[in-house]
Amino acid sequence: MINSRRLAIALLLALMPVKSGAPGSTLEKHPFKVRTITAGVNLKSTHDLATIEAAMAFLARARKRFEQAGYEVQTVRITTQPLGEYLGARSRDDAIADLTALDRAVKARNVLLNIGPVIVDDVYDSGFPQWAVRLIAATSNIQFSVTVTSPLRGAHSKAAQTAAEAIAAISKAGADGRGNFRFTASANIPPGTPFFPAGYHRGMPAFSIGLETPSLLKSVFESSEDAAGAKAKLKAAMEANLRPIEKLAFGIATREGRRYLGIDLSPAPSRDASIGEAIESLTHKPFGSASTLAACAAITEVLHGLAIKKCGYSGLMLPVLEDPVLAQRAAEGRYGLRELLLYSSVCGTGLDMVPLPGDTPPQELAALIGDVAALSVKWQKPLSARLFLIPGKKAGERIEFHDPFLVDSIVMKLD
């Protein structure tokens, strides 16, 4: 039985902000970071730089407000409506030059841009893979997707094949297959999702927030004695820490005349904030062991029950190549693709940053994307598949990236 006095003390400690900075400073050190402030816009055309410039000016003001409140803001981003809706009479090929110009503009201001899903219907598009390769080669800050589900048709098998062929083509066009960092197959992703590459926009100008919160989860779990107590403490700690962000965001929305869509509550991890480590703090076992599924479900239950305005995935992100503990446990063989799909059924955002053999046939990739789409349709939840084919590598071989955002691991088996 939990000692109620110890629980109360631990809860108070979890909720209290830590002061930092110079003597007399009121700056607070928050137990998490703002991964992104993402502005949603409607472009009139592929050369509508004025709308992009206005969004970047808004993001600069919003970022300043968050930083003045003591929050570290890692990125700012812009999402558009699906590309086909502002191509006009131009072809995709003709639009490459315009998109390259937009990319130069956002890159100069250190802003990321998502041009939305390029394919939204269930069609096989033989020209898309090479177009995707050209776009990746010509730009650095643009991201995009292909939609592989719809409310009426369910899973899109033809679009899944198109996405699979694009993943294979992109992987062969650059070192380590890194181009696929900027492309995904998306299933039931709602508009307003702040996280990329699946994000896109609908409606009036808006913005949303994405967070990096694994450190907060870890601190709560380390002071918990059982799962029930951990869930109660996590709910209290999350709401106490996120309400000030919500208040700040609503204030920005009022001043700026932009709709505030909410916070994507997914605890986005990084090299310095591992969701795998947070889960292990709850289970006291290596990620992938028995109880991992229950822990994933418990965390997601808390996220879904928070009295906070939500948007996007608001699930559990498990990006293998962005999280040091997830990458290590994959290298140890403690979990594989089947387990990741299983975790996605109760909590996750799909298959994210999964390293696969470089010679994987597109047909097998399409089947894997189809599994993700089937899960999404069955449970009516947002999922995506961002798959990393590693050129020249086979299952079980070691991969090293020498990249500040990617961690070393092994190539996983495509069972």
Image: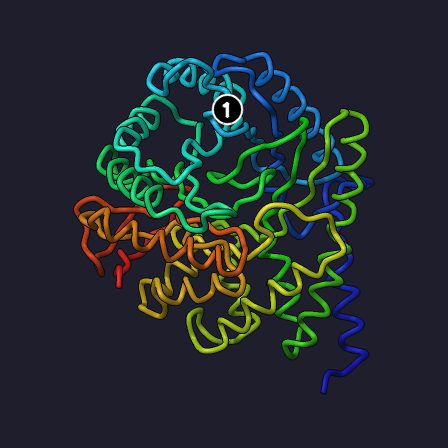
Quadrant for the N terminus in the image: bottom right
Q: Quadrant of residue 203?
A: top right
Colour approach in the figure: rainbow
Left or right, 121 with reference to 234: left
Q: Quadrant of residue 326?
A: bottom left
Q: Position of residue 245 (x, y in %)?
A: 74, 43
Q: Position of residue 175 (x, y in %)?
A: 25, 36
The residue depicted at 81 percent of the width and 34 percent of the height is 251
Return the residue nearer the eye: 235 or 339.
Answer: 339
Q: Position of residue 16 (x, y in %)?
A: 78, 57
Q: Position of residue 374 (x, y in %)?
A: 42, 57
Return the residue nearer the eye: 153 or 389.
Answer: 153
Q: Is residue 179 above or below residue 231?
A: above
Q: Secondary structure at mark 1?
A: helix
Q: Residue type at mark 1? A: Glu
Q: Is residue 40 above or below residue 20?
A: above
The residue depicted at 26 percent of the width and 40 percent of the height is 165
Quadrant for the C terminus in the image: bottom left
Left or right, 326 with reference to 247: left
* Residue at the outermost bottom position: 1
Return the residue nearer the eye: 406 or 190.
Answer: 190
* Residue under numbered circle 1: 85
Left or right, 250 with reference to 130: right
Left or right, 165 with reference to 119: left
Q: Residues within 10 Å of mark 1 (few under 14, many from 20)?
A: some
The residue depicted at 47 percent of the width and 61 percent of the height is 344
